[in-house]
Amino acid sequence: DVKVTQSSRYLVKRTGEKVFLECVQDMDHENMFWYRQDPGLGLRLIYFSYDVKMKEKGDIPEGYSVSREKKERFSLILESASTNQTSMYLCASSSSGSSTNEKLFFGSGTQLSVL
Amino acid sequence: AQTVTQSQPEMSVQEAETVTLSCTYDTSESNYYLFWYKQPPSRQMILVIRQEAYKQQNATENRFSVNFQKAAKSFSLKISDSQLGDTAMYFCAFPGNTGKLIFGQGTTLQVKP
């Protein structure tokens, strides 16, 4: 069965800490995505990657960066965590081609609390 | 700006009954896909159903079907014979002009025994 794995289900961090959220997929997908989910706002795209070492900003990239050194792994980095980054973070992947037509496969999410 | 609107934050339905979740969107594109995703309490989002905008026929997947009204830019999800396992948050989504999916705010559905 296809799988997208996020390394942590829950994380608690302090303001100012550098935070790494890891995501691994086993489907050999080209496209990988990081979303943020907040009540009443749905999912908002932070960053996406369509190939190794390639990345593009989504709708809310401020305060975040990403790394994709290997095809199967896509990391989200909070350089200096702030309380307004407390949220649920969802990783997703899809196969090549138009990502707007392809089914997204999601991880189980990381609930991050920044204190 | 392109938007997706789910006007029902919460809904409930009795087991075995039928429920319809609404979604409207705004786009100037003519050919696109529309999606409904389900997020159960386990939090892992899964695709429920997908509709191609150029197809007249509404998509159906077992107990799930859509009512797609292209002119009205409406894309509702109908769940027939609701089951307790259908309890989840449901998101509709469509591709924005940046080429990436835009998600609605979500509708929390509670199926009651």
Image: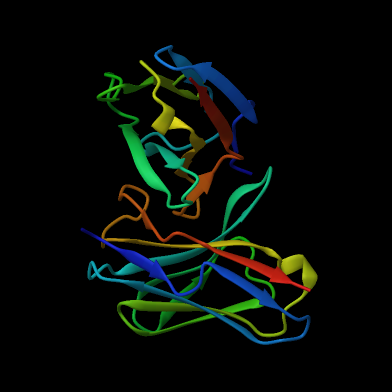
Can residue A97 be seen in this snapshot? yes
The number of callouts visible is 0
At horizontal 30% and vertical 50% (from top left) the residue drawn is A102
Q: Residue at x 28, y 25 (%)?
A: B59
Residue B106 quadrant: top right
Q: Nearer the viewer, residue A110 or A64?
A: A110
| Image quadrant assignment for residue A60 | bottom right
Q: Position of residue A31 (x, y in %)?
A: 34, 66
- Identify whether B50 is placed above or below A56: above
Q: Position of residue A96 (x, y in %)?
A: 26, 62
Q: Is residue B94 above or below residue A84?
A: above
Is B80 left, or right, of B60 in this rendering? right
Residue B25 appears in the picture as rendered: no
Residue A96 or residue A42, whichever sits in front = A42
> Residue extending furthest top?
B17
Q: Residue at x 30, y 79 (%)?
A: A71
- For this orientation, the residue located farthest to the front is B113
The image quadrant where one finds the N terminus of chain A is bottom left
Establish if B66 lies above or below A1. above
The part of the image, by quadrant, that contains residue B25 is top right
Please provide percent x and percent y for residue B22.
Answer: 53, 23
Q: Residue at x 43, y 49 (%)?
A: B45
**Visual colour scheme:** rainbow
Frontmost residue, B6 versus A22: A22
Q: Is residue A80 above or below residue B107?
A: below
> Relative to the observer, which residue lies in front, A55 or B82?
B82
**Where does the C terminus of chain A fall, quadrant-wise?**
bottom right
- Expressed as whole percent of the image width and height from the top left, the position of residue A93 reads 36, 62
